[in-house]
Amino acid sequence: MASRPSDDFADSIVYLVRTALGDALRSVIYFTPDEFEVLYLRSGLYADDPSRVRSVKEPLVENERLGFSSQETYQDLFGDESTEPDIGEYEYTIRVFSKGFVCRVLVDDHGVIVTTDELDIAEFEAQAVSLRSLLATENRT
């Protein structure tokens, strides 16, 4: 998979997340182990300065990249049929803050980070499951 998503794929990601989360959405970031691209940023954040956005988002992406190795650990740990109890496969991670959320969805060597204002946490499930499906589909092409 190339580190930069195609325009159609990027548009699909943003459309899916904006539809699911609406006006609470702050940002959508596509990332791989080596690169990242901010696909969507709510108007007015970071003074609409692209270099500031990258400098602010880079530490967040670096932290969320740890999920690539965690993903392998979870697959090894919970992929073994003898592991009890069976909790299923990794789907997504939500980090809860006092004024918003960070949601990370990973599939193989690419993922999406979504930041939002405060929401009902249940609103993330549909968008995360749909993002996993979209990321998996893109990996197969």
Image (cartoon, rainbow, N blue to C red):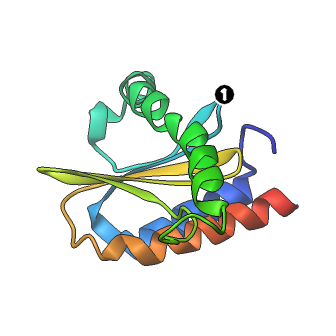
**Is 36 situated left or right of 60 in this image?**
right
* x then y, percent, for residue 77: 58, 53
Q: Residue at x 66, y 69 (%)?
A: 81
Rendered position, 66 above or below 121? above
Tell me where residue 117 sits by quadrant. bottom left
* x then y, percent, for residue 76: 65, 51
Rendered position, 26 above or below 120? above
Q: Secondary structure at mark 1?
A: loop
Observer-nearest residue: 120 or 53?
120
**What number of labels is visible?**
1
Tell me where residue 139 sits by quadrant. bottom right
Q: How would you rate the neighbour count of disc 1 (Cα within 10 Å): few for under 14, some for 14-19, many for 20 or more?
A: few
Tell me where residue 22 sits by quadrant. bottom left
Q: Quadrant of the N terminus?
A: top right
- For the view shown, which residue lies furthest in the right direction? 141
**Is 21 situated left or right of 16 in this image?**
left
Q: Residue at x 66, y 62 (%)?
A: 80
* x then y, percent, for residue 136: 72, 64
Q: Residue at x 54, y 42 (%)?
A: 70
Residue assigned mark 1? 34
**Is 23 situated left or right of 75 in this image?**
left
* x then y, percent, for residue 46: 29, 33
Q: Amino acid under label 1?
A: Asp
Q: Quadrant of the C terminus?
A: bottom right
Rendered position, 55 above or below 110? above
Q: Residue at x 64, y 30 (%)?
A: 35
